[in-house]
Image (cartoon, rainbow, N blue to C red):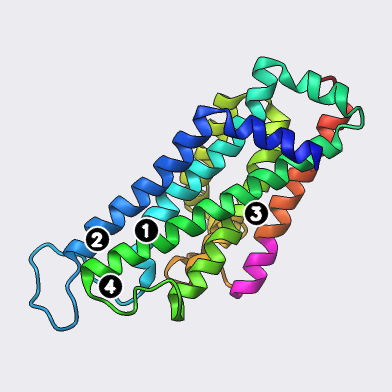
Amino acid sequence: MNLLKSEWIKATTTKSAYWLYGLGIVLAVGLAAIIGQFEQTSTGEPVAGAPGGGGDPLFAILGVSAFTVILAWIAAIVAVTGEYRFHTNKATFLATPSRWPAIVAKTVLFTVLSMVVTAVAVVIAMLVAGALSGLDSWTPFSGDGLRYLVRFPVYAALGTLAVMGLAHIMRNAAGTISLFLVWTLALEGMVSLIPRVGQDIAAWMPFANGDFWTQGESVRGFITWGEWPAFAWYAGVCVALWALGLVITLRRDA
């Protein structure tokens, strides 16, 4: 508990965490408001230039997957790499020579924060978009909306394990964030372009599998198995990356 309190104090006295989490929620809600404003209801007249496909509440929370989750992961990366940059990890490891309890405490805290921030963004975004659009299906408390309310925070929590593992391995904020963004935003989408084997490799990309489990058939891509096998693979890769970061941190100098 003392380690958790220590990590909580570090997190709450760092402005970057407030900015990243706050910006993630604001951007998600802002996009939801824009989408809700222009979404035509089933009884309304068609609006020129308005987006379609509003029956699925996933449409109302596009900002959560585009902004909130990404910024929550960056906050976790900064929390880890910031200690290496300012050498505060040395004092932490002196207080806990075995090291792993401190790493676990930080992981638990930022995993929970990622889940809470993502859940808050999903709820507010869906309520705002639903109120503005008039679509009763855009609610986070029933139907598909409730499924997204459960799955998005879990997806964010597992991704937090992965990025914290990468942060412990690289120990540099710019490098870790760059690698993570290139991996998730470019590499997983471009690997399918490799002749003959690209589509087979693309089916094994972990974040693509996580997106499929979270968002459903609309993002299946080249994945041939079901949602729960996709979730198992995504979770396994995320836990493995975190475990690798833990092992490397235990074996090398602070």
Is the residue 214 above or below the residue 243 in the image? below
Residue 143: assigned label: none
Amino acid type of the residue that numbered disc 2 sits on in the rendered structure: Ile
Q: How many marks can you see?
A: 4
- Front in this rendered view, residue 94 or 236: 94
- Front in this rendered view, residue 195 or 63: 63
Quick one: SS at disc 3?
helix
Q: Spatial distance from mark 2 to mark 1, Cα to Cα?
A: 9 Å
Amino acid type of the residue that numbered disc 1 sits on in the rendered structure: Leu
Query: Which one is earlier in the sequence, the residue at label 2 or at label 4?
Result: 2
Residue 158: assigned label: 3
Quick one: SS at disc 2?
helix
Residue bounds of the magenta highlight: 225-233
Q: Residue at x 35, y 47 (%)?
A: 27
Location of residue 128 by image quarter: bottom left
Per the image, the residue denoted by label 2 is 35
Query: Which one is earlier in the sequence, the residue at label 1 or at label 4?
Result: 4
Q: Residue at x 58, y 55 (%)?
A: 115
Q: Are marks 2 and 4 in contact (CB under 8 Å)?
A: yes
Q: Are marks 2 and 1 in contact (CB under 8 Å)?
A: yes
